[in-house]
Image (cartoon, helix red, strand yellow):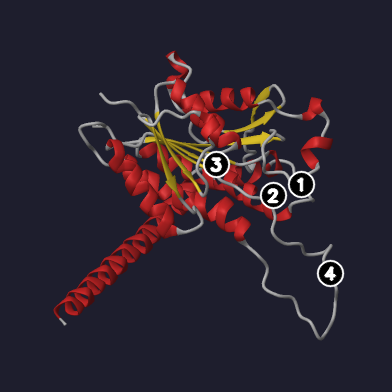
Amino acid sequence: MSNPVAIVTGASSGIGLALTQHLLTKGHHVVLLDLNPPPASANLPPTTTLFIRTDVSSWASQSAAFATAHAWRQRLDIAALNAGIDDRDCIFHALAPSAAHPPTEPNLQTFAVNLLAVYTGIKLFAHYAALPSAAKPRPGGAVVVTASAACLHALPAVPQYTATKHGLVGLVRALAPGAAARGFAVSAVCPDMVPTGLAPPGLMEAYPPEGKTPMATMLRAYDELLGLGGGEAGTPKNGAVVEVVVDDVLYNEPQPPQRKAAAVGPEVAALWDRVYRERNVAFARRAEEAARRRMAEEGKGKGKESKL
């Protein structure tokens, strides 16, 4: 049996680099996806790591990266979807009302990187982690997405960031039942002020030291979510959302709608699942068929060009 393989986005600095180094100590091979290569000072072993320059906000770039990552060792076992950026626009504080100058289109890259790229990353990981091979005969794997304490406590300074991180928690909880049925686990880690390079200059330096979360607490949370503690703790957690604040790893449980549940019963949840599953699978299948047709047409066009 070959070593398990993890893929980490935003892997060249901060939480992503620390997690990469941590997974290496656990015997994993690690694929690092980032726009920039990891620093030489990280001393990552070339035999057990692979860096792929990737723009996670681009489907073509992320899709190609996952294909290369799987081909490297013929298996994927863990996806830590950690890449993220903070706000790139402002609404109310930037108001300058003028009939002659309507608003320009806002920069929504925060949504592309923090939320949409995570959805596509989960879709890509599910595909490749489900492929049977001699290196990994059983399909399945564990996904941990990096949300934020801002998804549990709104942070007015960064509304784009807050919205995307709230979206990640909803995504994880909504995907969890389907993931479990296919041998996968999805969870979210919600760090509170971990010293990294994400914050703009001046914020981390002025932040009270007692309010900063050590990287060691983050790594403990990852061990719990990924089931890397051994023994009974060796099963990845599915649907879990954990806030990581200073020295604590706190599990956040969703509050069920008690009155509605009592009124309609569990059959309604099953109805929603059945109706939407059938429709959404059909959407996905049609998209796949359209993509195959486009590829076939492009192949024919290239064939004609080569004959000219």
Q: Could you tell whether 157 is left or right of 267 in the image? A: right
Numbered circle sitting on residue 155: 1
Query: Horizontal and vertical percent for residue 235?
Result: 43, 24
Query: Horizontal and vertical percent for residue 115?
Result: 56, 52
Query: Horizontal and vertical percent for residue 64?
Result: 36, 53
Count of marks, rendered view: 4
Q: Nearer the viewer, residue 39 or 255?
A: 39
Q: Is mark 2 on a helix, strand or loop?
A: helix
Instruction: Tell me which residue sits at (43%, 52%) in the image.
Output: 62
Gap in angstroms between the C-alphas marked 2 and 4: 20 Å
Q: Give the labeled residue for mark 3.
A: 82
| Three-letter amino acid code at the position of disc 2 | Thr
Numbered circle sitting on residue 95: 4
Looking at the image, the residue that sits furthest to the bottom is 100
Q: Earlier in the sequence, mark 2 or mark 1?
A: 1
Q: Could you tell whether 202 is left or right of 87 in the image? A: right
Q: Quadrant of residue 136?
A: top left
| Three-letter amino acid code at the position of disc 3 | Asn
Q: Give the labeled residue for mark 2.
A: 162
